[in-house]
Amino acid sequence: MWTTGKIIERVDWNDKLFSLRIAAEVAPFIAGQFIKLSEIQDDKRIARAYSLVNPPGTAYVEVLAVAVEEGALSPKLHTLVVGDEIQVSTQAAGFMTLAEIPWDEKQGKHLWFLATGTAVGPFISMMDTDEPWQRFEKVVLVYGVRHSDDLAYLDKIRQLQQRYPGQFIHIPCVTRQQVDGALDCRITTGLEDGRIEAVAGLTLSAADSQVMICGNPEMVTDAQRILKDRGLQKNLRRAPGQITVEKYW
């Protein structure tokens, strides 16, 4: 099912990375889920999935996107301005939610979010709810990008640092330039050589950690391998573990 949404706000983080806030009537959703945006091109519906950045209960949906020149839909989205319309799916979907993580103190007291690029979106949504802060002693966001202007929602992240001092740890990783306060490595490199744990002041372990990984498939695959080598296992409904993943394409 589709509904017509109207753009009510737009933010350009750089010349290709942007956020759209869309007034649309969609069914209640769980933080971490995604909706689809679409348009009709040559009598054919073109639809793509985008994670919701906004928390549940808002009167709008918000997505973080990057314009890909050869993309079927993102170039069109990149041209939208306030007042324009776009088709929005009325029902969100997806299982990368905190509800899928075992609710047991023995299943981890530290929540780690590992994200690359626009995949930070669902984690922003989760952190804008009470659940992670009530369930976990520490929440760590590791956010990997190429350049500093690829880091979106820094104001929101700083607000969370102020709201949850001592509980929230943000570790940006910027690979193609030196940035004060950021690691100059890929997330996987920082996991392998211990830099990420050193900055966090925490150890990734099966006993203490729940890890949610979202981003490019290579990072997701390599991060899982590194964590599995340390004894962490993929979280399955039939066999609860410590690793929950979603690939972004």
Image (cartoon, rainbow, N blue to C red):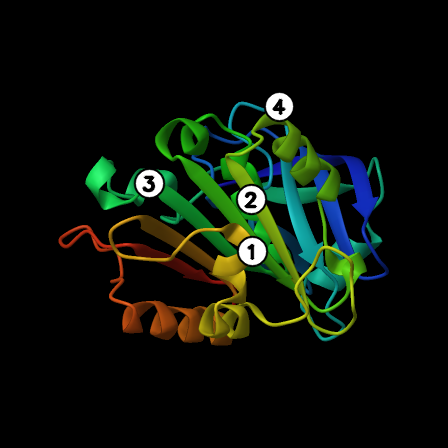
Count numbered badges in the picture. 4
- Given residues 48 and 198, the one toward you in this image is 198
Q: Position of residue 176 (x, y in %)?
A: 75, 74
Report the Cα–Cα distance between label 3 and label 2. 14 Å
Neighbour tally class for label 2: few under 14, some 14-19, many 20 plus, Cα within 10 Å: many
Q: Which mark is residue 199?
A: 1
Q: Position of residue 110 (x, y in %)?
A: 38, 44
- Looking at this rendering, what residue extends furthest in the left direction? 238
Q: Which mark is residue 109?
A: 3
Q: Which residue in the protein does label 4 denote?
A: 59
* Residue at position x 44%, y 39% in the image: 138
Q: Is residue 41 above or below residue 101?
A: below
Mark 2 or mark 4, which is nearer the start of the sequence? 4
Q: Is residue 106 above or below residue 184?
A: above
Q: Disc 4 vs disc 1: which is toward the camera?
A: 1
Mark 2 or mark 3, which is nearer the start of the sequence? 3
Label 1, secondary structure: give it: helix
Q: Disc 4 vs disc 2: which is toward the camera?
A: 2
